[in-house]
Amino acid sequence: MEEYIVSARKYRPASFDTVVGQRALTTTLLNAIRTNKLAHAYLFCGPRGVGKTTCARIFAKTINCTNPNEHGEACNQCESCRAFDESRSLNIHELDAASNNSVEDIRELIQQVQIPPQTGRYKVFIIDEVHMLSTAAFNAFLKTLEEPPSYVIFVMATTEKHKILPTILSRCQVYDFARMTLQNTVDHLRYVAQKEGYTVDDESLNLIAQKADGGMRDALSIFDQMVSFTGGNITYQQTLDNLNVLDSDYYFRLVDHFLKHEVEPCMLILNEIIQKGFDPGIFIGGLAAHMRDLMVSRDAQTLPLLEVTESLRQRYQEQAQRCQPRFLYRVIKLCNDCDQSYRTSRNKRLQVEICLIQAAQDEDVSAGRRPKILKPLFSAPEAQPQVQQSVAAANNQTQATPNATQQRPTTPNATQPSATVSSGNTQNGNTQPTSGIRTEIGTASPQGVKMRTFKLGTFGPSLRNTQVAENTAEPTPQKEQTAEIETVEKTGLPLTAHELELAWRRGANMLPKDYKALATRMETIELNIVDDTHFEFTVNNDQVKNAFHAIMPFILKQIQEQFNNSAIAYDIKITQQEVRPIMSKDEMLKLMIENNKAVEILKDAIQLEMN
């Protein structure tokens, strides 16, 4: 029975032209060998499984070849090449620094450096995982590394370049190996499958390459695993089942439901994925990657960033054309936020479900600077439209009560530019006269409900001419009071306690950090609704009142947007604290006696006197 050799060793490159994905580095090394411009120390850096140690061995074999070909590659026929292939060459020494990292190990290596090669031109020392050497070992190696004998070449390999001392880096030529691209990995796996006589489709190879994450050795190991599982006939579904990878079809289906604003199917797909044993956190990461692939598929310039097979590329392009960039950016942001909060959340599944619900909502909900609000999952019955007040009814009401107007005190925020005075309100289609006229500071012209507005300058007597107005029995025609009436359209909802509380707390949460103390105080304040467009609250003192005046324009804007009603206004009241007079001791005793006669009896019994 023939001995089995894993694909990573069986198909390990034996020459520079067979190295996959490192064409620039292999060309540089070949040119240095052909021109005989060899450095005394090399450092190969890069991720795992990309060919660092393989290139070091090929390099050591090639520089000792006595009969290289026209391209500078080893001939594989001379005694030096045959000794290397049979692992009996005395000119090539490999040291595993992970298990030989002490000063004593480096001293033994330095002693071997002093012995010249018996055959060949160079004595090559390959030190793998060199970053594992201790600091003392690095320092002991410095002098030899800087000035080795002319026949000695050091080739060091590491996956963690940042752990190498700068004094070591400065003495080496550094070569940075790149990760394997998806296409390079797929092509090499297809080559191995053809050599071995296996049948495999491109989708399966693409999935294996993605799982390997840029490492050729990992890809070949996964490939061997799939061959053992399928017996050499590898299919896409078997690859999904064996590697425990989520099918991209789930993500395509989810995006289709997102575009249709369908929440329920998204929840069912998530439940199906969890039932198959996948972690919701892995699912969110995959969804974010899928949205990123859709984003780069929209533009021909970024399409090369999409590392998938041709058939899957067409599917990405087709779905990407149905997605607006704003939608893609929003869902990517949602997935990223969910991934960050997933690790610290107690209810991890709920975090993912909220992310899916928000992704399926209409993107206008989160547009601009408005807060994100989850829309209802199920449709509610529409509210009855409010009957508009007619202009004729407003005119009749004004004529009926021309002098019975009494202005309500306005809010202290008197710096706003506009003022609206309403003569009544409308509820359930009926006009109800109010007890007075309210001046609303800082509100824009409402829309939808017909109201009457007056110019304050022509309504009522002037404050500067109060004395004249009192002494005048009948106003002259020139001083006759007039009221200009305008019909303004207003749309909006009346104040409700629950919605007002939500808008109030949302505004508090959106305040800057400088107002954290004030935002905390807002959570304890009780809001009182006066009427459909007016609310009030109470604070302790004038200082707190002034602080609220500074932030209320921002809070009021949130409330007006919540109810779509720009006529909403507010009042701030100050708690009336009982003022207790300062009393002397005699006065206090006298008051106690008045309230309780037993105190007087006790006073006389003990002959109490107040000093």
Image: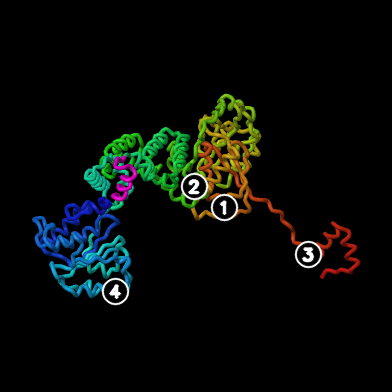
Distance (Cα) linking label 2 and label 3:
66 Å
Residue 86 percent across, percent down from the top left: 19, 60
Q: In the rendered structure, does residue 504 fall within the stretch colored magenta? A: no
Task: Report the amino acid beneath label 3.
Answer: Ser
Image quadrant for the C terminus? bottom right
Q: Reply above or below: 557 against 395.
A: below
Q: Disc 1 versus disc 4: distance between alpha carbons?
A: 59 Å
Q: Tell me the crowding category of disc 1: few under 14, some 14 to 19, or many 20 or more residues within 10 angstroms, Cα based.
A: few
215 or 32, nearer to the observer: 215
Which range is magenta?
219-234
Query: Which residue does the image show at 31% across and 65% down from the upper left?
Result: 131
Q: Mark 4 points at which residue?
A: 139
Residue 269 versus residue 568: which sits nearer the camera? 269
Find numbered disc 3 in the image and state the secondary structure of the residue it sits on: loop
Q: Which residue in the structure is indicated by mark 2?
A: 348
Distance, label 4 to label 3, CA atoms, is: 87 Å
Q: Report which residue position mark 3 lands on.
A: 584
